[in-house]
Image (cartoon, grey):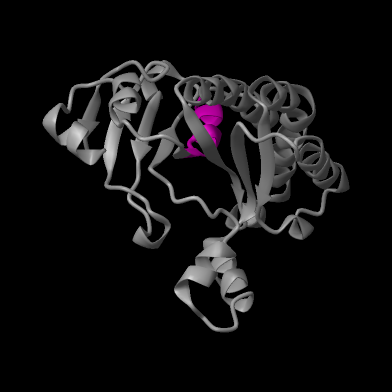
């Protein structure tokens, strides 16, 4: 897949997805820059996160409509929960609203199974935890698409859990016990996702163990601008 980018660095994301010629693509999305975007414009955090998740809905539709079968969305890391209480409360409320209003329609539309990756016991929000459980229960029989919601997610904790579940420490068994078992083909970090001047997805290099790829930059307006090497 990387050879396509090396040979034709000006292709669009749509073309890249088409020319990879691989079934069952797994894309990771890291929404980033929302607090900065809102602060620059004097917009309250809750409204900022709500607007961001609205755009995330369109991003999910884009990838699922282009034959991506698995998405991992990094909603909230364990480190994020150490921020100021007001900031944490705002993002938790926005995720709860997204889970109860917009996400059920998306999951039903794509017959998409929903799984949580992370330690939800540390969220301290019964309503949010309940909404996550409800989404998992109501989509359990779906099989056409898969969405991993990384919430209160810590990659070190994920590895520790997988190792604990694999007494023989065999690498193949450890991988089977990861929260997210499917290797990523692409990981996209979206900076300032709510303004056209910052509508940039940065594909970040991550651990080779999980199958992540090299770093590239996608400048996009709904993923239609050219892909360029980063």
Return the x and y of residue 192 as percentages of the image width and height. Answer: 45, 30
Residue beneath the point at 48% across and 25% down: 63
| Viewer-closest of 25 and 76 | 25
Return the x and y of residue 128 as percentages of the image width and height. Answer: 80, 42
| Viewer-closest of 90 and 185 | 185
Residue beneath the point at 38% across and 16% down: 221
Instruction: Specify the farthest residue to the left.
Output: 7
Above or below for 179 versus 76: below
Residue beneath the point at 48% across and 78% down: 170
Q: Is residue 24 magenta?
A: no
Q: How many marks?
A: 0
Q: Is residue 122 left or right of residue 75?
A: right
- Range shown magenta: 28-40
Figure quadrant of the N terminus: top left
Return the x and y of residue 175 as percentages of the image width and height. Answer: 51, 65
Q: Is residue 9 left or right of residue 88?
A: left
Return the x and y of residue 73 as percentages of the image width and height. Answer: 56, 40
* Quarter of image, res 215: top left
Figure quadrant of the C terminus: top left
Q: Is residue 218 left or right of residue 165?
A: left
Above or below for 109 versus 6: above
* Quarter of image, res 181: bottom right
Instruction: Specify the farthest residue to the bottom.
Output: 168
Residue beneath the point at 28% across and 34% down: 217
Above or below for 152 versus 127: below
């Amino acid at each position: 897949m990387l050879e396509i980018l090396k040979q034709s660095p000006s292709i669009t994301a749509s073309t890249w997805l088409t020319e990879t010629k691989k079934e069952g693509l797994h894309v990771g999305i890291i929404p980033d820059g929302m607090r900065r975007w809102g602060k620059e414009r004097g917009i309250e955090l809750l409204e900022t996160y709500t607007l961001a998740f609205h755009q995330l809905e369109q991003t999910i539709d884009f990838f699922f409509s282009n034959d991506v079968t698995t998405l991992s969305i990094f909603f909230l890391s364990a480190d994020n929960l150490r921020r100021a209480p007001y900031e944490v409360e705002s993002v938790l409320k926005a995720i709860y609203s997204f889970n109860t209003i917009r996400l059920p329609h998306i999951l039903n539309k794509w017959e998409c199974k929903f799984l949580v990756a992370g330690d939800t016991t540390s969220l301290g929000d019964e309503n949010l935890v309940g909404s996550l459980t409800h989404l998992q229960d109501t989509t359990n029989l779906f099989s056409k698409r898969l969405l991993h919601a990384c919430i209160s997610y810590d990659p070190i904790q994920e590895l520790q859990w997988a190792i604990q579940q694999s007494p023989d420490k065999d690498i193949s068994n450890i991988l089977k016990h990861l929260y997210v078992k499917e290797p990523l083909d692409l990981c996209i970090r979206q900076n300032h996702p709510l303004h056209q001047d910052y509508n940039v997805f940065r594909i970040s290099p991550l651990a080779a163990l999980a199958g992540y790829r090299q770093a590239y930059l996608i400048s996009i307006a709904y993923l239609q601008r050219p892909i360029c090497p980063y």
